[in-house]
């Protein structure tokens, strides 16, 4: 934990799924910010073997907000619905308690969950003037990684959601840039550079957080701890093709990624949302996929039930017997 006596500050880590938010959250922890129960933060699986670094109470409450406003983040009026819920005591009061609990645990604290990027109109009313770290990764690599994580094993290789994932990335980035456009407290971290040269990027993050919290005299021990936390072996999806040459990506998505790269060097690089429009029919695309996903999930759950598995096994046995008799 960092020294007492510095300004209390929320550190909010934003980015689309599979863009490096987990490792940056780990770095915030190594720097000294409080993130919650360490056993929860380090929860892992094969997709994130070094931990997700997500506060369980936050994750649960994020889903409560989606229950209240609806999960269709792509629909018209979604941001306005979130803002209105920030004035609703049934959500505002417990959310404020979550923030107060984090702030009371130490002079600096962090939250990471990619879906926070979509709920900024609500949470900005609660945490106030926060510090933001936004991850920047080749969108195609993020899309490939997310597809591997989300597409069921039974249909892997037969169903592609790469175009959907790029559309999702575009919406996440536009939402982040739109809501943070006036903030001076933001740092954009390039995932590829972080993995290639951990020390240089950790130095950027460390100096940024030191300045944001009023901490003087950088600790070399803390910096080294951060750099050692980056595991290059976890960079498992890397494209040999520059994103500007990815055929499935739209011109607007390529331009938006170029802007994100510029913001690594200049966080205040001009942003015009109208320059990167979503293509026509994108809302219907996401809605249709959401309904398909829900349908497939129900069918998949049914197929995994013991009774149905037994019935299928019996049916297959009778079919095999009939084929044997015919032969």
Image (cartoon, rainbow, N blue to C red):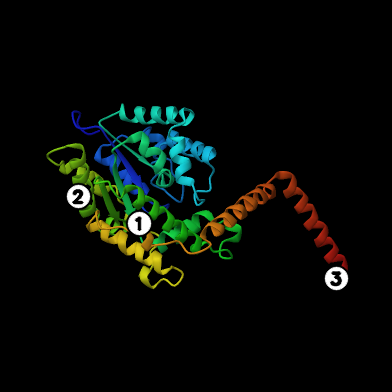
Residue density around tag 3, few if under 14, some if 14–19, many if 20 or more, within 10 Å = few
Residue at label 3? 327
Identify the residue at image location x=13%, y=38%.
216
134 vs 152, nearest the viewer: 134
Q: Check if mark 2's residue and mark 3's residue have beta carbons within 8 Å.
A: no
Disc 2 secondary structure class = helix
In percent of width and height, residue 29 lies at 30, 39
- Which residue does the numbered mark 1 point to in the structure image? 233
- Measured Cα–Cα span from mark 2 to mark 3: 72 Å
Q: Secondary structure at mark 3?
A: loop
- In the image, which is nearer the foreground, mark 2 or mark 3? 2
Mark closer to the chain start, 2 or 1: 2
Q: Is residue 232 left or right of residue 144?
A: left
Instruction: Report the residue at 61% width, 53% height from top.
Output: 291
3 to 222, vertically: above or below: above
Between 190 and 302, which is closer to the camera in this rendering?
190
Q: Which mark is residue 186?
A: none
Please name the residue that numbered disc 2 is placed on: 203
């Amino acid at each position: 934990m960092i020294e007492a006596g510095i300004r209390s500050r929320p550190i909010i880590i934003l980015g689309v799924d599979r863009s490096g938010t987990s490792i940056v959250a780990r770095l915030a922890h190594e720097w000294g910010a409080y993130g919650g129960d360490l056993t929860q933060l380090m929860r892992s699986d094969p997709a994130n073997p070094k931990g997700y670094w997500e506060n369980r109470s936050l994750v649960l409450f994020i889903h409560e907000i989606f229950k209240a406003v609806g999960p269709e983040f792509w629909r018209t009026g979604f941001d306005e619905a979130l803002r209105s819920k920030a004035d609703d005591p049934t959500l505002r009061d417990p959310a404020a308690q979550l923030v107060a609990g984090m702030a009371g645990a130490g002079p600096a604290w962090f939250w990471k969950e990619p879906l926070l990027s979509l709920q900024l109109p609500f949470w900005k009313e609660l945490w106030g003037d926060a510090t933001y770290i936004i991850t920047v990764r080749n969108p195609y690599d993020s899309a490939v990684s997310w597809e591997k994580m989300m597409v069921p094993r039974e249909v892997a290789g037969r169903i592609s959601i790469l175009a959907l994932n790029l559309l999702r990335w575009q919406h996440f980035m536009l939402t982040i840039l739109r809501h943070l456009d006036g903030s001076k407290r933001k740092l954009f971290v390039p995932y590829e550079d972080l993995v290639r040269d951990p020390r240089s990027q950790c130095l950027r993050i460390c100096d940024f957080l030191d300045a944001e919290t009023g901490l003087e005299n950088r600790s070399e021990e803390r910096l080294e701890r951060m750099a050692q936390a980056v595991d290059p072996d976890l960079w498992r999806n890397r494209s040999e093709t520059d994103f500007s040459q990815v055929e499935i990506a739209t011109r607007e998505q390529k331009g938006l990624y170029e802007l994100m790269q510029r913001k690594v060097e200049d966080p205040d690089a001009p942003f015009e949302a109208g320059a990167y429009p979503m293509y026509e029919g994108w809302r219907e695309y996401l809605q249709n996929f959401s309904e398909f996903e829900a349908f497939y999930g129900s069918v998949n759950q049914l197929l995994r039930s013991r009774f149905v598995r037994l019935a299928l096994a019996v049916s297959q046995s009778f079919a095999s017997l009939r084929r044997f008799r015919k032969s």
